[in-house]
Image (spheres, rainbow, N blue to C red):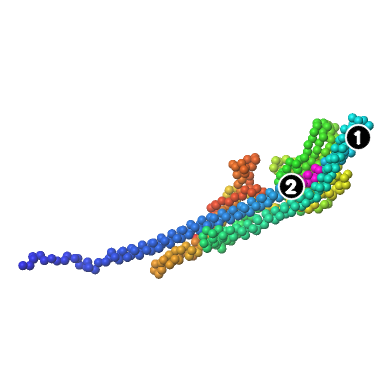
């Protein structure tokens, strides 16, 4: 007997046609996942290369700024070396003038006591004879010292002057040429050292070279030695040299006594920009009341002088520069007298000017002049309106670039081809970085701070130029961006 309700399938109409949809969706999902994975891989590679390139650009910009700071510090060391050499020339001239005046004094005192020893009065004659003997020995010793010192001092002054010429040329070369050419090379070297095949973009190289040239034009002045008249820049340079003299070269004046004094006066001054002049005197001086209206009485005892000049032309010792009013120092805002405060009107001062080289021993005036000294040389320094403060120094920008093929994306390494290929929209990757050169002399470190504790502004006589990374100026960024330089 058949079942009253036979088994039947209740599958909805058309259900057989929908079988396999999950598989299709899975394939589509896997395709999207693959494309996303490739996209993520490409993005990661580009970002990684971009970070590397940014770090390389930072290193390159900083290296360029360090190179410029080194060039300016090198110029500062050369300028300081020249100042030190000038002081050494002044010292040599001072020594010869000082020996001359002692030699003349020994001869004069020997002659005086020899005359007194002839007086037929033993209490006078015996001490006079002893003193005459002592001063005779001193006279002969100083005479020999002068003869020995003269050629040695001449050789030393010639050598120091040659060194100054070399220092001046080296400083100018470092600032005007070497620092610029070397900076572009350093930028490329640092970029390639950090990212293989990275380089300066053509436009970025042009901008960097422009900044290198502009840094010199905007921040530095080149001061040429004036042929005629006065130059404020060289007056400043001369004042730096004069202020740097040691105490012996600056002022050799001493006195003993009150109304009647045994006094020595002496000093070494730079006349104009190309001559060191030294004068030394020894005298017995009687100070007279000012109401008498006459000069003090001075009895000459010894005198001498010396000069360092380019060529001998009988250059005068008196009158001094600025009509015997000495030189004005901007450091302490005061005026100093010539030759350590010597009175040019004194009889002994005129004797020294007319007989600087001990003529009583056959010393010709020409022998007191050391030739071959060319004086101050041309030099670079920071413009008066620039101080080298943070944010006000020269800025150097590096635009680093590398071909997109160096990013090792899926297309480059061959991971995705055909429909899976994701073509890059740019041909290269670029990064910008800038660095600034600034001046900062530490005030908190005993080794470096000034004695007066004050903050020092920048110059090319002090080697405290440094470098730091800064934001790229908007003008430079826009110029490179508008030209397609920044991507």
Residue 455 position within the rendered picture, expressed as x and y whole percent measured from the top left: 62, 43
Q: Name the residue under label 1.
A: 117
Q: How many tags in the picture?
A: 2
CB atoms of marks 2 and 1 within 8 Å: no
Q: In which quarter of the image is residue 354?
A: top right
Q: In this view, does 131 lie to the left or right of 411?
A: right
Quadrant in the picture for the N terminus? bottom left
Q: How crowded is mark 1: few (under 14 residues within 10 Å), some or many (20 or more)?
A: many
Whether residue 305 can be seen here: no
Comparing 60 with 230, the one in front is 60
Q: Is residue 210 above or below residue 462?
A: below
Q: Residue at x 80, y 32 (%)?
A: 257
Identify the mark nearer the N-term, 2 or 1.
2
SS class of the residue under badge 2?
A: helix
Q: Mark 2 points at which residue?
A: 88
Q: Is residue 100 left or right of residue 172?
A: right
Q: In this view, does 406 lie to the left or right of 221?
A: left
Q: Residue at x 57, y 55 (%)?
A: 63
Q: CA separation, marks 2 and 1?
A: 43 Å
SS class of the residue under badge 1?
A: loop
Can residue 404 be found in the magenta stretch? no
Comparing 150 with 90, the one in front is 150
Q: Residue at x 83, y 43 (%)?
A: 142
Q: In this view, does 157 lie to the left or right of 47?
A: right
Q: Quadrant of residue 15?
A: bottom left
Residue 475 position within the rendered picture, expressed as x and y whole percent measured from the top left: 55, 56
- Which region is colored magenta? 86-99
């Amino acid at each position: 007997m058949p079942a009253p309700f036979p088994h039947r399938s209740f599958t909805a109409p058309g259900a057989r046609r929908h079988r396999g949809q999950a598989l299709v969706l899975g394939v589509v999902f896997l395709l999207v996942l693959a494309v996303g994975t490739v996209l993520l891989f490409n993005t990661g590679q580009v970002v990684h290369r971009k970070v590397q390139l940014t770090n390389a650009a930072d290193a390159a910009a900083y290296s360029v700024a360090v190179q410029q700071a080194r060039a300016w510090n090198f110029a500062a060391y050369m300028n300081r070396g020249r100042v030190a050499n000038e002081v050494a020339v002044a010292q040599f001239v001072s020594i010869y003038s000082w020996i001359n005046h002692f030699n003349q004094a020994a001869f004069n005192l020997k002659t005086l006591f020899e005359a007194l020893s002839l007086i037929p009065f033993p209490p006078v004659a015996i001490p006079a004879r002893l003193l005459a003997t002592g001063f005779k020995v001193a006279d002969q010793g100083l005479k020999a010292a002068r003869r020995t010192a003269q050629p040695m001092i001449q050789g030393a002054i010639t050598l120091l002057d040659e060194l100054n010429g070399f220092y001046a040329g080296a400083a100018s070369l470092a600032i005007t040429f070497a620092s610029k050419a070397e900076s572009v090379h350093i930028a490329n070297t640092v970029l390639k050292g950090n990212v293989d095949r990275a380089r300066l973009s053509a436009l970025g190289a042009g901008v960097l070279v422009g900044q290198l040239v502009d840094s010199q034009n905007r921040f530095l002045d080149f001061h040429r030695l004036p042929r005629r008249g006065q130059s404020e820049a060289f007056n400043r340079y001369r004042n730096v040299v004069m202020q740097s003299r040691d105490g012996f070269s600056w002022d050799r004046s001493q006195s003993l006594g009150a109304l009647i004094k045994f006094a020595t006066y002496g000093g070494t001054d730079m006349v104009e920009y190309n001559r060191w002049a030294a004068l030394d005197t020894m005298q017995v001086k009687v100070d007279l009341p000012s109401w008498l209206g006459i000069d003090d009485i001075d009895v000459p005892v010894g005198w001498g002088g010396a000069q360092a000049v380019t060529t001998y032309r009988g250059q005068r010792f008196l009158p001094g520069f600025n009509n015997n009013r000495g030189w004005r120092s901007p450091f302490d805002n005061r005026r100093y007298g010539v030759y350590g405060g010597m009175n040019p009107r004194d009889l002994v001062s005129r004797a020294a000017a007319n007989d600087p080289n001990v003529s009583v021993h056959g010393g010709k005036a020409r022998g007191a002049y050391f030739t071959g000294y060319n004086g101050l040389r041309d030099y670079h320094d920071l413009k008066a309106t620039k101080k080298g403060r943070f944010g006000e120094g020269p800025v150097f920008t590096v635009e680093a670039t590398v071909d997109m093929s160096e990013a090792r994306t899926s297309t480059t390494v061959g991971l995705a081809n055909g429909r899976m290929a994701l073509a890059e929209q740019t041909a290269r990757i670029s990064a910008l970085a800038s660095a600034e050169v600034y001046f900062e002399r530490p005030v908190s470190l005993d080794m470096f701070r000034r004695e007066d504790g004050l903050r020092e502004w920048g110059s090319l006589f002090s080697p405290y130029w440094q470098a730091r990374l800064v934001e790229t100026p908007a003008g430079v960024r826009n110029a490179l961006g508008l030209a397609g330089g920044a991507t």
